[in-house]
Amino acid sequence: MLAEIGLFAMVLALLAAMAQSVFGIAGPWLGRDSWTAAVRPAVTVQFWTTTLSLAVLIAAFVQNDFSVKYVAANSNSALPVGYRVAAVWGAHEGSLLLWAWILVAWTLAVALLSKSLPSSFAARVLGVLGLVSLGFLAFTLFTSNPFMRLEPAAPDGRDLNPLLQDPALAAHPPMLYAGYVGLAVAFAFACAAMIEGRLDQAWARWTRPWTTIAWAFLTVGIALGSWWAYYELGWGGYWFWDPVENASFMPWLVATALIHSLAVTEKRGLFKSWTLLLAILGFSLSLLGTFLVRSGVLVSVHSFAADPARGMFILAFLVIIIGGALTLYAWRAPLLRSEAGFEFTARESFLLFNNILLIVAAGAVFAGTMAPLISDALGLGTLSVGRQYFDPVFLLPTLPLLALAAVGIHSSWKKGRVSDRRAAILISLAVGVLITLVLVLGVWEGAKILTPLGFGVGLWLFFSALVDPIDRWRRGLSWSRGVIGMAIAHAALGLFVVSVTAVESYTRERDLALAVGESGTVGEFEYRLLSLETAEGPNYDALRGEIQVFEHGEPIGILYPEKRNYWVQRQMMTEAGIDMQWSRDIFAALGEDLGAGRWSVRAQVRPLINYVWFAALLMAIGGVVAATDRRYRRREETGE
Amino acid sequence: MTPRQRRITLVVGILAGVSLAGVLALNAFRENVMFFFDPSQVAAGDAPIEKRFRLGGMVRPGTVDREAGSLDMSFVVTDFKHDVRVVYTGVVPDLFRENQGVVAHGRLGSNGVFVADEILAKHDENYMPPEVAKAIKEKHGGVMPVNPDIRAAPQTGT
């Protein structure tokens, strides 16, 4: 009975979304104020019905209701309660419902915080969001109903995929979706501006915090996924240029460009149509990512069972949304001309190059991600594109981008006056180079050409980002949140580059064959297998190794890698043993029984790897700090 | 320079930069893209010698050969028409086993032995890489010779 309530609530939510989009778009168009006024109530109804629907699904999981097909397929009575909740978004149907809920939660936030906007504009924004919502709810309802019954009910469930039974992965999809869907808000703002035919600096100031928050969620979501892949897949890498990783990374790159372009639009009223285009592009890539992941066209950990009907539906939705928005753009963008000039070394130029380089990087990733699909579809052979392609083509635009950022954050609007800060820029460069020399020649030895380059540019950016807050402090000026947030985010990017460089340059890794009591060497490290014992968890049994690691003969840590066998799915899982130290991770994963009492062991020592994710988190924090700057909040209080 | 000249310089500069990036990307793409071949294509000589590619098929039962206690191993990848022997040193994935789909990255030696540097077998025991499923299907007119459960897609979640 409960499941039917959930389904019914979803139908109501669909109707509310329909009302929301009709009232929101037609109301201001036909000048019917009563319609316009009805948009916010429609949002409220949609929010509560979608919430009810999601709550019902969560309840079905928690109560082990195996008469619901989706629950039976993705949960089990032996599964801990926390993972039963996470199992809601452990597969396709529930993920979509979660997506729809996050969208309506964003919509509600917009509805509540947009009271100071002109009512027709707010209604249009909410109307466009309603259209997106409508598409997703219809998709869920007609192709992927999570409340489908199973007759007769299963005695027990098939369990959540053991790979997904993990805290970081429980949080990864909601974060990522919050980012994807947050870009829908920027998209809706862009569409509303185009419908209205008016785009001013107030518009940009309005759109900025929303976009930055969405970007922050996306950053955290991607970082969580990468962290999970590192310790859970047992391969020990943090980024594989997997198509699904790329699918989330492309919107991130575009969203990053959008944040910067919005800054220009807000401060100087420039780049208007470019900003609109980026807003459309960002959300389109989010949808494309969904299409790639959900339709089963991609070969990846993330792909669900292929279903052409679902693929076609998303594709159609994609065409309608993107096609519609681009048509609107072609028709309306010429109305929104920018009328101002700027000098070559002004901040506007730096941000222009920032945008170009980010879009080139996104384009390169896009080409590498789509090429296998296109080649396959055209019958040109089955090919795959790996890091041999992605690494160089991604670094090509991003290395100059970093150097540009180190200089550009000191430029001023309109007039090229970098010279004011020339000393600061040069000092931060000198400090960066000095530390690079210490790192490359002293701490770690042996380097590839990219190593000093990565360290140098990363450290330069790091120190350069700190100059402005320090300068303001010395001159007794106040720190606005915008200043702090920008400094944190850019310093974090520098830190990110430094840690990635360290990981890529100085990782020691080797596969070893070890029997109990034997040891093997990995560079200057020695791995000794002390014991192999069986252990038991709530829904699995495991073989647990105890490995002591030595550096130059000194013991530096003990690792407990596991090989788990999950009972329900009869799946073998590698649980890596990781000793997290402040400057590095010592890593071991158990492979298989090689015979003669030996086991294969994947041994890795990765310097600074945790700073990769920490830096991503810092970037997101910087974004949140900047997005809560007083100038965005004051406007709401005074209704400017 | 007048503002107009400056703008033209800017546009030309950007265009030049973007086209340079495009050319380099295309070059990187041409050199680093990996093609997929099945054992029949290898037998027919379609696959390149001493150039990295992906070899896919099923692990033929009874061919996984390992000297006890060593990381060196070899096995035969088959599409039930032709076989290719693969040698590999290192840890194989959890789901690598006989009669399962596998994709190996590596180079084909002139002696016809494929030297793999990476072995992929994805996260579902019924999973077979779509390209492997397709290759085998084409050889058998749509009838799977073994393991009727095999589907052409993995079944894991996000």
Image (cartoon, coloured by chain):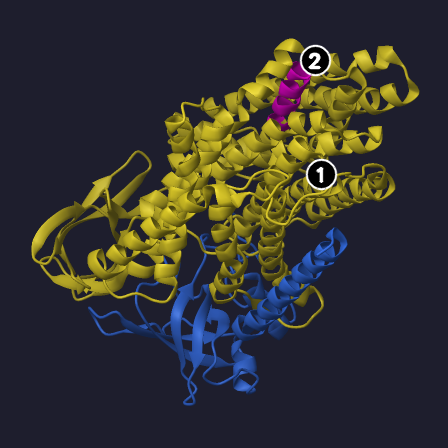
Tell me residue A446's x, y (percent): 26, 66
Q: What is the x, y in percent for residue A39? A: 77, 16
Instruction: Report x, y in % for residue A323.
Output: 80, 45
For this orientation, the residue located farthest to the bottom is B111
Looking at the rendered image, the disc whose residue lies closer to the viewer, 2 or 1, is 1
Image location (x, y in percent) of residue B147: 50, 61
Q: What's the residue at 47%, 69% (across, down)?
A: B58
Which residue position is annotated with label 2? Answer: A115
Picture residue at 52% right of the left edge, 32% below the top? A174
Which part of the image, by quadrant, shows the C terminus of chain A? Answer: top right
Q: Which residue is mark 1?
A: A270
Which chain contains the residue that carries disc 2?
Answer: A
User: Looking at the colours in the rendered structure, which chain would you say is drawn in blue?
Assistant: B
Say whether residue A113 is left or right of residue A219: right
In the image: residue A590, left or right of residue B80: left
Name the kind of residue labelled 2 in the image.
Lys
- Is residue A109 found inside the magenta-colored segment of the image? yes
Same chain shared by disc 2 and disc 1: yes
- For label 1, the SS is loop
Numbered tag placed on residue B129 in the rendering: none
For the N terminus of chain A, the image quarter is top right
The one of A190 and A224 positioned closer to us in this rendering: A190
Check the image and name the residue furthest to the right: A30
Residue type for callout 1? Leu
Q: Nearer the viewer, residue A105 or A78?
A: A105
**Magenta-tinted stretch:** A101-114
Query: Quick check: B17 above or below B41?
Result: above
Colour of the chain lettered A: yellow
In three-dimensional space, the C-alpha distance between marks 2 and 1, rounded to whole angstroms, equals 26 Å
Q: Quadrant of residue A535?
A: top left
**In the rendered image, is residue A86 in sight?**
no
The secondary structure type at the circle numbered 2 is loop
